[in-house]
Image (tube, rainbow, N blue to C red):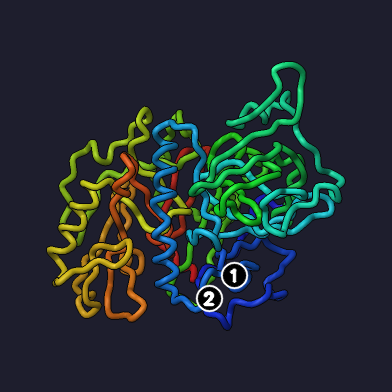
Amino acid sequence: MEYSSIIFFFFFFLSTSCIAAFDPSCSSDSDLSIFHIYGKCSPFTPPNEASSWFSTVMKMASNDPKRFSYLSSLAAQKPTSVPIAPGQVVNVGNYVVRAKIGTPGQLMFMVLDTSNDAAWIPCSGCVGCSSTMFDTNTSSTFGSLDCSASECTQVSGTSCPTVGSGSCNFNRSYGAASSFSATLSHDILGLGKDAIPNYAFGCINAVSGGSIPPQGLLGLGRGSLSLLSQTGSLYSGVFSYCLPSFKNYYFSGSLKLGPLGQPKNIKTTPLLTSPHRPSLYYVNLTGVSVGRVSIPLAPELLAFDPNTGAGTIIDSGTVITRFVQPVYTAIRDEFTKQVKGPFSSLGAFDTCFAVTNEEVAPTISLHFSGLDIKLPAENSLIHSSSGSLACLAMAAAPNNVNSVLNVIANLQQQNLRILFDTVNSRLGIARELCN
């Protein structure tokens, strides 16, 4: 069994000619593959195949406030679940992992997310689920867990009998006005060449609303039921990924599980932990620069506070980076000073300008404890479908969220190798062209 699995991404929003039935050439027995939800090798069809990639990203970014609201609620210690984007329904930029469940293994394309822990899979007989479900009756290794199981105590929203024992059933809200009920179960989880026995997951039996991932979800958070926690001896609490650029036609990044094959020389910053939401990957963002100008920010706007959830997290499921309002306003104002106007708004982006002025757009740098990252233009600007406008690809926290949380999102992470080392409590970032 290998201790390091390399996972390949295909991350783009392809035209109608490229979105077709699942391509057999995408199948591989030698690696664990991950695709964008609308990638060439994904079985899912985008809501509007004729849309340009910019339109698709715009639609995805318009749903960031829903996810941001949930992330902020979690940081504020409210008993809610992280809203993982389901892809073809709410159009949030996600990746799906090709996994096999049970014996013999049944192929499922599961949404993967760094801010969620438990795995959820639609099971046979599920009411309201998609047509692809895990058939529990044909797996010789499947079993449900009862309320006496230690894993049941790690799940919120359970409904166990007061007398005696029974199945560990639980309910969760998810995304926008969606929820599901599930039974905590266990079976073999196959990832690439690795077979993980007795992997605990929620076997979904009913859903309400349209935001539930059609073939399930696999969490890469650092809570007790996450992939890293359940495979500690196999992957040693370490993984890294490189997300490819939105702009490329074929792009292929990689996700590496386990300590083998990880970059040796990479600058790191401490991972911080909130005791009330231990699954989120907090980092200490100490400042932001626009060009050569260090933005003057009150320390409390960036400071990590484990009691309130204030601070900054790295998140793979949010599309564009969101800052608390005063931080974003200061960044935007300095950016507009250095770029020639006029400026206009376009969807989620409020700082758009003529692409002819892009050459004078300043570099935006993020400063962490022990680590500075200069964002290339592709990580900080996004272009309109017509190509006539360039927009600052960041935004303020939604107005309806009383947020103290800054979220570094996936557009700002592209073409960077990001290392998550939970054992040594460090996060590494290095430039890597992974297209």
On screen, residue 114 versus residue 64, left or right, reads right
Camera-side residue of 61 and 32: 61
Classed neighbour count for the residue bearing mark 2: other residues with Cα under 10 Å, few (<14), some (14–19), many (≥20): some
Horizontal and vertical percent for residue 40?
A: 60, 73
Q: Which mark is residue 45?
A: 1
Residue 339 to residue 260: above or below: below
Q: Position of residue 164 (x, y in %)?
A: 77, 18
Q: In the displayed image of the protein, which residue is found farthest to the bottom? A: 17
Could you tell me the amino acid type at mark 2?
Answer: Glu
Q: Residue drawn at (46%, 76%), measured in percent from left and top?
A: 51
Q: Are marks 1 and 2 in contact (CB under 8 Å)?
A: yes
Q: Rate crowding at label 1 as few (under 14), some (14 to 19) or many (20 or more) other CA atoms within 10 Å.
A: some
Dot 1 falls on a residue whose secondary structure is: loop
Q: Residue at x 67, y 53 (%)?
A: 129
**Mark 1 vs mark 2, CA separation in Å:** 8 Å
**Residue at 29% across, 56% down:** 395
User: Is residue 235 depicted above or below 319 in this figure?
Assistant: above
- Residue 49 — which label? 2
| Residue 16: numbered disc | none
The residue at the far top in this view is 163
